[in-house]
């Protein structure tokens, strides 16, 4: 008997849990001992690209897609009502959403705590380019971690998720069918929240949570949806903030003095830039309220300010606060955006160690910025200053 087969069933199932479900199922042919082990694995990782090989064109064949659906159905049926910890599903080759929702409901009924979904559907399978998630998902008493990826618009309804600690939604568009202020209390222990490509549906926004530690909001403001008049953050225990949005008229409540790192990305249109650069323009007064946001994050150690934010700050250079704790600063440049705020900003960062200036197309690799041109390292009064050009 080999050493691996001599291990306890619990340990073998733990090992199998690290494999894609298709590969774990293949171990059933090894021997009678292995025949049922994979059925007891509490983690399912199903990826239709592994099964269908769409790069070879197999995903376009109806019989191949049907065999994939049959495989997943059989896996869930063989596991019966056994408890399940995590369910990861990548399904992007044309399976009907009703079928996918049936799989999701199956694992929800079995007490799944981690759900990772990456879905895409054909045009004929969805209405108005929208994917409707099963209502059971919004009422789970066991979900702790939920990650959603979709090439379609994802709608979010009223929910009650008392155990959820991490929520990550990234789709073509995220629509909330309730005020954001009403949705957040549905997650009383939420610690991490990331939402990309969302739209506001009310004029006055309040993000209020005593449990949040990490928050990332990317607001598109497209499609004729309202740009909020006010945005408030009542998040006293927040440590990390990544916020992208149009400039609101006011920021009346800002409670997040414990922040360690922040990225503030204000979207300004070319028309707005043109108007604010004209003398005696009312737009300048509205942009001036962003200083309230800077004042409350002035104790951060890491800060990132894209080019749109620098343009806004160029209108209120006299009010930029002193960042005494700031060690690491990243700024982005564009030829058509103002840089008047930079001298004041640098003077107000007396303990800055590192400065990274992005220009053009950049990516981050292993913690370093790489661009389609040379990277110049230059020493100044700061200990390390990197100019990426």
Image (cartoon, rainbow, N blue to C red):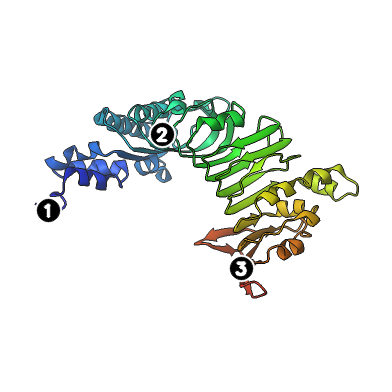
Question: Could you say which quadrant of the image residue 109 lies in?
Answer: top left
Which label's residue is closer to the chain start, 2 or 3? 2
Q: Position of residue 178 (x, y in %)?
A: 60, 26
Which label's residue is closer to the chain start, 3 or 1? 1
Per the image, label 2 sits on a secondary structure element best described as loop
Residue at the image point whose x is 49% and y is 33% from the top: 188
**Which quadrant of the figure contains the C terminus?**
bottom right
Residue at the image point whose x is 50% and y is 33% from the top: 187
Residue under label 1: 2
Q: Residues within 10 Å of mark 3 (few under 14, many from 20)?
A: some
Which label's residue is closer to the chain start, 1 or 2? 1
Q: Depth check: 2 or 124 in front?
A: 2
Query: What is the number of the mark on residue 200?
Result: none
| Labels 2, 3: front one | 3
Q: Is residue 184 left or right of residue 7?
A: right
Per the image, label 3 sits on a secondary structure element best described as loop
């Amino acid at each position: 008997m080999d050493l691996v087969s001599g291990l306890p069933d619990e340990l073998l199932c733990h090992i199998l849990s690290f494999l894609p479900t298709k590969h774990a199922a293949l171990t059933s042919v090894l021997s009678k001992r292995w025949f049922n082990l994979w059925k007891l694995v509490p983690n399912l990782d199903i990826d239709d690209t592994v099964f269908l090989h769409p790069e070879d064109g197999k995903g376009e064949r109806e019989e191949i897609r049907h065999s994939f659906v049959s495989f997943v159905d059989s896996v869930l049926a063989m596991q019966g009502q056994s408890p399940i910890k995590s369910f990861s599903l990548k399904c992007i080759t044309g399976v009907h959403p009703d079928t996918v929702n049936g799989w999701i409901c199956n694992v929800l009924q079995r007490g799944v705590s981690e759900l990772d979904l990456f879905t895409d559907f054909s045009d004929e399978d969805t209405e108005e380019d929208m994917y409707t998630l099963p209502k059971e998902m919004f009422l789970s008493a066991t979900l702790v971690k939920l990650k959603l990826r979709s090439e379609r618009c994802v709608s979010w309804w009223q929910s009650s998720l008392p155990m959820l600690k991490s929520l990550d939604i990234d789709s073509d568009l995220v629509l909330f069918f309730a005020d954001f202020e009403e949705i957040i209390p549905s997650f009383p222990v939420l610690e991490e929240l990331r939402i990309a490509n969302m739209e506001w549906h009310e004029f006055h926004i309040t993000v209020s949570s005593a449990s949040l530690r990490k928050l990332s909001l990317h607001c598109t403001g497209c499609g004729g949806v309202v740009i909020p008049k006010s945005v408030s953050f009542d998040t006293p225990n927040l440590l990390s903030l990544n916020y992208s949005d149009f400039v609101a008229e006011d920021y009346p409540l800002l409670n997040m003095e414990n922040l360690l790192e922040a990225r503030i990305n204000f979207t300004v249109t070319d028309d707005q830039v043109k108007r604010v650069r004209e003398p005696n323009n009312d737009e300048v007064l509205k942009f001036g309220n962003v200083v309230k946001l800077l004042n409350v994050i002035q104790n951060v150690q890491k800060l990132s300010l894209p080019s749109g934010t620098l343009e806004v700050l160029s209108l209120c250079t006299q009010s930029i606060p002193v960042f005494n704790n700031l060690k690491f600063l990243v700024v982005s440049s564009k030829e058509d955006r103002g840089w008047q705020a930079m001298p004041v900003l640098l003077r107000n960062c007396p303990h800055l160690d590192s400065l990274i200036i992005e220009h053009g197309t950049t990516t981050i690799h292993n913690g370093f910025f790489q661009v389609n041109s040379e990277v110049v390292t230059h020493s100044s009064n700061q200990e390390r200053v990197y100019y990426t050009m």
